[in-house]
Amino acid sequence: MEEVRIQKKDRAVSFRVIEEEGEYIVFDMSLSNPASSRTNYSGKQFAEAWKAVESILGKTEIPDEIIKYATL
């Protein structure tokens, strides 16, 4: 599993890639959300996972560490 943490102002996201499964998980790490609703996306579509990131953080550049997954 590969994980990249992305933070903007007071919001933070964990973007996890499980390569063996081809799965992306977006986890809202902001303390303002209840723990039960922190997973914003879990699935196999990078574009949908990135939409979940941007729904939390706003418009965000894809970090170099995970850009390779955006083109798969």
Image: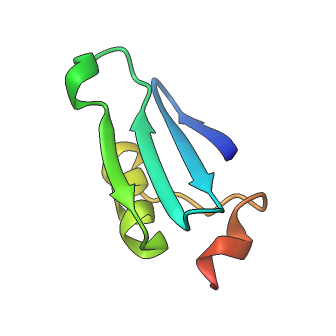
Q: Residue at x 45, y 63 (%)?
A: 50
**Residue 69 placement: quadrant:** bottom right
Q: 22 or 14: nearer the eye?
A: 22
> Which residue lies most toward the bottom here?
71
Q: 60 or 44: nearer the eye?
A: 44
Could one spot residue 47 in this view of the protein? yes
**Residue 42 placement: quadrant:** bottom left
Could one spot residue 33 in this view of the protein? no
How many dots with numbers? 0
Q: 54 or 37: nearer the eye?
A: 37
Quarter that holds the C terminus: bottom right
> Which residue lies most toward the front here?
20
Q: Position of residue 65 (x, y in %)?
A: 77, 57
Q: Residue at x 42, y 52 (%)?
A: 53
Q: Residue at x 64, y 85 (%)?
A: 71
Q: Position of residue 57 (x, y in %)?
A: 41, 45
The colouring scheme, among rainbow, by chain, secondary structure or one colour, is rainbow
Q: Position of residue 26 (x, y in %)?
A: 43, 47
51 lies above or below 56: below
Q: Residue at x 55, y 47 (%)?
A: 15
Q: Is residue 68 left or right of residue 34?
A: right
Q: Position of residue 49 (x, y in %)?
A: 41, 62
> Which residue lies most toward the right here?
64
Q: Is residue 30 left or right of residue 66?
A: left
20 lies above or below 45: above
